[in-house]
Image: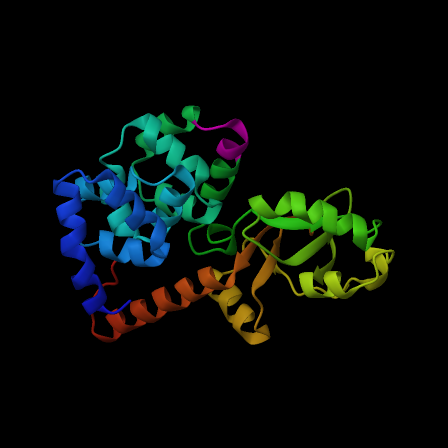
Amino acid sequence: MPDVYSSLILPDVRQMVQEEDRHGLTEFCKVLHPVVVANILEELDPREVWVVLDHADLRLRVEVFEYIALPRQIEMVAQLDKRRLSELLEEMSPDDRVDLLSRLPHNRVEDLLPLIAQAERNDIRRLLSYDEDSAGSIMTTEYASLPANITVSDALQKLRQQAPDSETIYYIYILNSARRLEGLISLRELILARPDSVLSDIMERDVVRMRVDDDREDVAQELARYNFIALPIVDSDDRLVGIVTHDDAIDVVQEEATEDAYRQGAVEPLRD
């Protein structure tokens, strides 16, 4: 978003915060794209940011928060009590959540985990266990998967149920009962296929994949090479454990380029 756009709206937002204009702040959060809202909020102090975000429902609040730069996120969560922070973390996407938690003090993370649902808690611990330079550190566990022995008609019905909890449904991964990756089908192919076709007959079997312990930069390069939207990540037994999406790959490329620029200037790269 151009800076001039931010400068035009920012004074109005500050005035609404000072005047406790609930209606205005609610409309500000709802009408503008979350990226625009996040960019404007980065100009406010953390207390003011939460005053604004408290006028958005939880899902929208999380969406805006995830677009805010990580260093600012860390400043912001310092303002939250355990209950409010645990609610925020439960709704965040797994990869963004782990990025944030990996920067928080270990004792605070351990203090928060008991307040988070068991399934989310297990996911957090697993993702935090991966090396920060590995594919596992940037993947998300929110992906769409289906068995191979169902029809296209049944697949579309199951996909509707999975869609709200998946980061992307453009690629659907075909898994066996042991969650080993057997194939892939795109949403486009699924929509165009005959309703009575069985997935095993139309899926792509030669699926490009990366290992969970592969270097994250290699994963980003592989995504760029094939021009994929997402890349499946498997463990040593070829079980699907997550996917890396194109936006996370872009972040990796930007981080690596920034580190290289620092080193060329004989300066130690910053963590964020």
In the image, what residue occupies the spot 72% across and 45% down?
158
Give the position of the N terminus as an image quadrant: bottom left
From the viewer's perspective, tell me whether residue 110 is left or right of residue 271. Answer: right
Where is residue 244 shown, x and y percent of the image?
Answer: 53, 57
Residue 60 place in picture, x, y as percent: 39, 45
Left or right relative to 263: residue 179? right
262, above or below 154, in the image: below
Q: Is residue 272 visible?
A: no
| Image position of 61 with respect to 206: above or below | above
Most distant residue in the top direction? 114
Tell me if I can see residue 106 in this picture.
yes
Residue 238: horizontal and vertical position, in percent?
Answer: 69, 52
* Residue interval drawn in magenta: 116-122
Please state, as top left, top right, bottom left or bottom right, where the C terminus lies in the image. Answer: bottom left
167 vs 103, nearest the viewer: 167
Left or right, residue 2 beside residue 137:
left
